[in-house]
Amino acid sequence: MKKIVLFFIFITFAQLSFSQGFGTAPPPNKYKASKVVDPVYGITMYEKLNLKTGGDSVRNDRKGYAAQEWVQDIYESGKVLHRGYYEDGQLKIYKNFYENGNVERSFKVVDFKRSNMQMFYPTGKLKSEITYYEGNPQIWVDYYANGQIEYSEENTKDMTSLISRKSYAEDGKPQEIFECTDPKKKKYTKKEYYENGKIKAEGPMRFSASTIDYQKDGMWNVYDESGKVTKEKWVRGEEIKDK
């Protein structure tokens, strides 16, 4: 008898817990996959509701009030499109899904200042990962469909300086490597590569506040495809030719 009573208490608790989550949610909105999934950028319709990534819009429920707690949207097929937790109409945690069931993107808050976004290919492989600091994309990494890194960028937390920027070919060979060597003076080094991965050019760079751009500044080594090097002298973005 005691076991039966405990069983019914458990069932009642489970039902109450569910009703506080998805159980009380309104019927989900239905969407056509071709209308909401961009072949390049994926499912972006919810980004305007994410304050942490720059969104400034609010989602309302069917009664016109700001959406609260868990909300779920589905495809016309009945498959889950979006599942997110809302506070005052704005997203705090969410996942979007392709119609095949794989996650399209996943967003979560790490702490008071940092949040993380992961985006995926329809196959389920990681496509991009972004770490936001106070709403700005401080660290960004893109991947090819084969898993190789395509592009990476890291900035200082206040977004005033670039720490590094790197790009790679699909086979993993470097294309361009740009890294900070002196944060205070905003000095950098840059390396460019041929398609075969051999070094093409390398030298120092500096950030110009007047042009808001990076300029060659110092001695550069330029290589032909056989590896023969030629020296170039640059000053504030202008090449100085020997007389």
Image: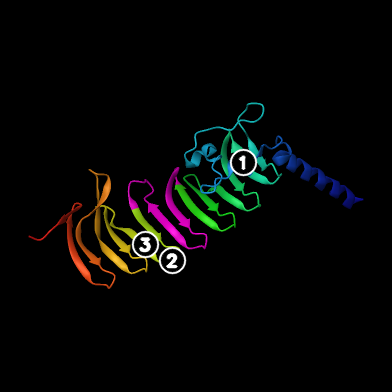
Which amino acid, by three-letter code, is at mark 1?
Answer: Tyr
Instruction: Kindly state the secondary structure of the residue where label 3 is placed.
Output: strand
Which stretch is magenta?
Answer: 133-162
Which amino acid, by three-letter code, is at mark 3?
Answer: Gln
Residue tagged 3:
175
Pointer 2: residues within 10 angstroms few (<14), some, or many (20+)? some
Give residue 11's position: percent from left, percent from top. Answer: 82, 46
Give residue 194's position: percent from left, percent from top. Answer: 33, 65
Please tell me in which quadrant of the rendered image residue 49 appears: top right
Horizontal placement of 57 versus 237: left or right?
right
Q: Earlier in the sequence, mark 1 or mark 2?
A: 1
**Do residues under tags 1 and 2 come within 8 Å of each other at their CB atoms?**
no
Which amino acid, by three-letter code, is at mark 2?
Answer: Gly
The Cα–Cα distance between marks 1 and 2, rounded to whole angstroms, is 38 Å
- Residue at (56% x, 44% y) in the render: 43
Q: Is residue 80 above or below residue 224?
A: above
Residue tagged 2:
172
Q: Is residue 105 magenta?
A: no
> As rendered, which of 168 and 107 lies closer to the eye?
168
Q: Is residue 134 magenta?
A: yes
Question: For the C terminus, which image quadrant?
Answer: bottom left
Residue tagged 1:
85
Please tell me in which quadrant of the rendered image residue 45 appears: top right
Give residue 71's position: percent from left, percent from top. Answer: 65, 39
> As rendered, which of 214 and 87 lies closer to the eye?
214
